[in-house]
C-alpha cells in the first residue's frame, strides 16, 4: 500500500470509523471508490489536487512546519486525527478548507451510498421497488466526427427546455435532431443503485461543487436533463398574479397550463411521504 493510499484510508476512517455492526469507511471500500471516482472525471488537475492533499498530511516534514509535530497523519490516534482535520476545516488557508470539504463530503457519500451499506439501512432507506421498464420509444445514435446528419432543426440539449421544443417541432412535421452530450440511458438501465445513479445521471458523476468546494452542485446530465433526476409540485400561478399579468397583456394561460399538465402527466396522486413529511402531516 502506498503512502497516499494509507493517508486516504486514514482520512476516510476518521470520518467513518465504524463501531459494532457498522464497518469503517475502509472496510466498505470507500477510499478505493473515492479515488476511482475522482480519476473517472478525466481531469488530471483534480487528481493532482487530491494527491497534493494526501502528500501534505502524510509528510512528517510538512506537518512539522504546519503543526509543530513531525508525524504522519496516519500514525496519529483517532482523536488526534479528528482534531487535525477540524483545524483544516476552519483554517484561514482556503486550500485546507477545500480539502476538508471534499474529503468529508465524498467519504460520507460513498459510505452511505455503497451497495448494501448498513448506514443507509440504519437511516431507514430501502431500495425502491422498480416497475417493469417500458419499451424504448426513441431512435438514438452516437454521432462521430465526420458524420453528416440532415434535419430541419437541430436542438441542443434534451432537458425541460430542449425536449419540449423538439417535441413541438416534431409535432409540426419538422425533421428534428436533438444533440445530447450525456450517454443514452433509458428506463431499462435504471436499477435504483445510489452511486451508479450519481455517476450515470449527474454532472461530474454527482460530485460537482462550487470553485471553493463549499457547496455541492447536483445537476442532471442525462437524456432528459434535469427532468430525469428532479421531481416537482405543479401549481398554477395565483389569481392575483394572473390579474397582474393580464393587465400587462398576458392573458388566457389556461390552455397552455392544460397542455403542460397533459404532457408531464400532472395529477393529484401523492408520492409516499418520507419520515419528516409524515411527521408534519400528523
Image: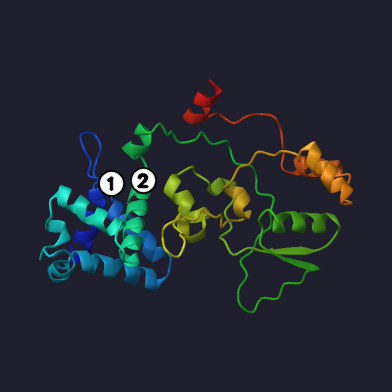
Where residue 19 appears, as percent x and y from the top left, is 21, 37
* Front residue (pair 211, 269): 211
Q: Residue furthest bottom?
A: 146
Decide if residue 50 is on the left or right side of residue 129.
Answer: left
Where residue 8 appears, as percent x and y from the top left, is 24, 59
Where residue 242 appears, as percent x and y from the top left, is 82, 42
Q: Residues within 10 Å of mark 2 (few under 14, many from 20)?
A: many
> Which quarter shows the N terminus?
bottom left
Decide if residue 86 is on the left or right side of residue 41.
Answer: left
- Which residue is tagged 2? 114
* Front residue (pair 35, 252): 252
Residue 257 seen in render = yes
Write down the quadrant of residue 67 in the picture.
bottom left
Residue at 39% in and 45% down: 113
* Front residue (pair 151, 113): 113
Q: Residues within 10 Å of mark 1 (few under 14, many from 20)?
A: many
Marks 1 and 2 in Cβ contact (< 8 Å): yes
Total numbered labels:
2
Which disc, if any, is residue 191?
Answer: none
- Element on which disc 1 rests: loop
- Which residue is tagged 1? 28
Where residue 226 appears, as percent x and y from the top left, is 60, 52
Residue at 80% in and 39% down: 240
- Element on which disc 2 rests: loop
Position of residue 19 relative to residue 69, above or below, is above
Residue at 38% in and 68% down: 46
Decide if residue 229 is on the left or right side of residue 86.
Answer: right
Residue at 36% in and 58% down: 102
Amino acid at each position: 500500500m502506498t503512502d497516499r493510499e494509507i493517508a486516504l484510508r486514514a482520512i476516510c476512517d476518521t470520518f467513518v470509523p465504524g463501531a459494532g455492526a457498522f464497518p469503517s469507511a475502509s472496510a466498505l471500500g470507500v477510499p478505493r471508490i473515492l479515488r476511482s471516482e475522482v480519476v473517472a472525471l478525466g481531469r488530471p488537475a483534480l487528481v493532482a489536487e487530491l494527491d497534493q492533499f494526501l502528500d501534505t498530511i502524510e509528510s512528517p516534514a510538512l506537518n512539522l512546519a504546519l503543526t509543530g509535530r513531525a508525524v504522519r497523519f496516519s500514525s496519529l490516534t483517532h482523536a488526534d486525527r479528528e482534531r487535525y482535520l477540524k483545524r483544516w476545516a476552519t483554517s484561514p488557508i482556503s486550500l485546507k478548507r477545500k480539502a476538508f470539504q471534499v474529503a468529508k463530503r465524498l467519504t460520507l457519500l460513498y459510505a452511505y451510498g455503497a451497495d448494501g451499506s448498513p448506514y443507509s439501512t440504519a437511516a431507514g432507506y430501502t431500495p425502491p421497488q422498480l416497475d417493469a421498464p417500458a419499451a424504448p420509444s426513441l431512435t438514438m445514435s452516437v454521432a462521430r466526427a465526420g458524420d453528416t446528419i440532415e434535419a430541419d432543426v437541430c436542438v441542443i440539449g434534451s432537458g425541460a427546455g430542449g425536449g419540449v421544443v423538439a417535441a413541438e417541432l416534431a409535432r409540426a412535421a419538422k425533421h428534428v435532431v436533438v444533440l445530447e452530450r450525456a450517454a443514452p440511458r433509458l428506463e431499462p438501465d435504471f436499477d435504483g443503485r445510489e452511486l451508479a445513479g450519481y455517476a450515470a445521471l449527474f454532472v461530474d458523476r454527482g460530485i460537482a461543487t462550487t470553485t471553493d468546494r463549499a457547496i455541492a452542485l447536483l445537476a442532471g446530465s442525462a437524456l432528459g436533463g434535469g427532468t430525469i433526476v428532479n421531481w416537482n409540485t405543479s401549481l398554477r400561478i395565483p389569481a392575483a398574479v394572473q390579474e397582474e399579468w393580464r393587465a400587462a397583456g398576458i392573458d388566457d394561460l389556461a390552455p397552455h397550463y392544460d397542455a403542460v399538465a397533459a404532457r408531464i402527466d400532472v395529477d393529484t396522486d401523492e408520492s409516499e411521504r418520507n419520515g419528516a413529511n409524515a411527521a408534519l402531516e400528523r
